[in-house]
Amino acid sequence: MDGDKMTLTKELNHYIKRNIAASVGLSIYILIDTIFISMTGGSIGMAVLNLSLPLFSLFNCLGMLLGVGGAAYYSLNKLTHPERVETLYSEIIIFAVIIGFLIAFGINIFIHPLLRVLGGNSQTIPMAIPYVRILAFGAPFTICNYVSINFIRNDGNPTLTMMATLIETSSVVVVDWLLIFGVGLHMEGAALAGIFSPACSLCVLTRHRHFTDRRLHWHWVVPKLTTIGHAARLGIAAFLNELSTGVSIYVFNIVLLKLAGNYAIAAYGVISNIAIVTVAIANGVALGVQPIASREYGIHHFKNVRVALKHGLKITVTIAIAAFIILSIFRTPVASIFNSHHQSIMMKYATAGLPIYFSSTTFTAINLLLILFLAAIDAASTSFSLSLLRGYIILLPMIVILGFTLGTHGVWAAVPVTELLTTIIGTLVVRNRLSALPDRNEKA
């Protein structure tokens, strides 16, 4: 039995390491891009980046709605009802291109009122206008990239999707630097690199046409809204999860703008972009545990299900505590990386906010693991409810209430308070679920 546990632990470590590497890859590019923007645009550039992040989130949301939902609908029908999904990929891609360009033109037409709604003011709007105008045309590329990655992975070619991600993240860093500093396009260069990133991935994904076992084929068709609707319904959960990121950033920005102005938003830009890396690591652990826990649950190896969860918790909590200690002790040098213009006000907010905000790392890591673990043990609706609590129901009121009672410190504290409450609820739910299962492995 100990040998079986050792084998399972070894398999878990293999999955966890691979998923951490994959998750961290893209987040490192985002972090480097943020550093480049701070170097070329200073604190105002950082504020502009953070004000525009809800738009990035919108593009990602639509990509996940159509991509995750469409790929799930495709997988459910490709063997039993292939006629239903013969043109599905083509219909969704064509629809995504149309929607993407409509969004891009809409943003450009209504740029001034949109930036005001996002929290722009006389300091940030002049720099934001050219940046967001260019950024808007990344919408069709981003949406199509999400759709293509999900469909091609479900068409039996995950190696190509991994290769596309690796080439995209490695090449875009070089292009980002070249456009911002080499060509001297500054913020506009960063926006162009944001378009290049998904476009590069799409170019790599075209290699799928040489995949011998593919079932996907291109068809020039008129998208049917009923087909799009059937597919999109399966992507609503992923859409809402991703949307919570954009909504929370927007609420953070508006509250911070009212409390302390653009430099506080710039400080939040520093904090939120570091958080992308810590969350990516935690997601990597959770994604490594999920398939093993799901498989063991499916074959009624319930003892192994518990082993997978405990091992994942041990790793993710250890990493999270280490991250919190490092970010707290070295908060000044970490914040200084994003402050090449030596803006003292932004530094004051960032160094004060880092230890408060990242006191959430342990709870965040536990929550991400519990949410995916619940989905793995056939409790998808409970998993989704926990996601809603964490991303909307608890967090958004906390930002407003704590912000307007405790100031900027309250805003930073909203995240650890939310994550702690979610951890308490999630732990009780998971313990209740596991208590209903036998303590031993059974024959399926």
Image (spheres, rainbow, N blue to C red):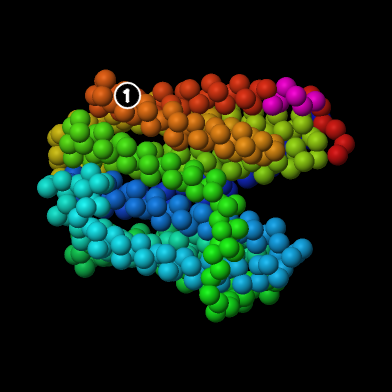
**Helix, strand or loop at mark 1:** helix
Q: Give x and y (percent) for residue 96.
A: 46, 65
What amino acid is labelled 1 in the image? Ile
Which quadrant would residue 404 be assigned to in this image? top left
The answer to whether 144 is drawn above or below residue 337 in the figure is: below
Is 104 contained in the magenta span? no
User: Residue 150 at what x, y percent from top left?
Assistant: 57, 59
Q: Quadrant of residue 152?
A: bottom right
Q: Is residue 342 left or right of residue 139?
A: left
Q: Position of residue 74 (x, y in %)?
A: 65, 62
Q: Name the image quarter holding residue 195.
A: bottom left
Quadrant the C terminus occupies: top right
Identified at 41% across, 56% down, the residue is 59
Q: Is residue 299 above or below residue 142?
A: above
Residue 40 lies, with reference to residue 368, above or below; the image says: below
**Residue at 36% from the left image edge and 53% from the top image edge:** 56
Determine the residue located farthest toward the right in the rendered image.
Answer: 443
Left or right, 439 with respect to 250, comes to right
Camera-side residue: 154 or 400? 400
> Which residue in the protein does label 1 denote?
401
Query: Residue 256, how many percent across, how many down?
Result: 24, 34
**Which one is in front, 295 or 58?**
58
Report the residue at 32% width, 37% height from top: 251
Question: What range is drawn magenta here?
Answer: 433-438
On screen, residue 346 versus residue 19, left or right, reads left
Q: Residue at x 42, y 69 (%)?
A: 98
Quarter holding the N terminus? top right
- For disc 1, the neighbor class at 10 Å (few under 14, some 14 to 19, many from 20) is some
Q: Residue furthest left?
A: 122
Q: Of all residues shown, which one is farthest toward the bottom?
A: 220
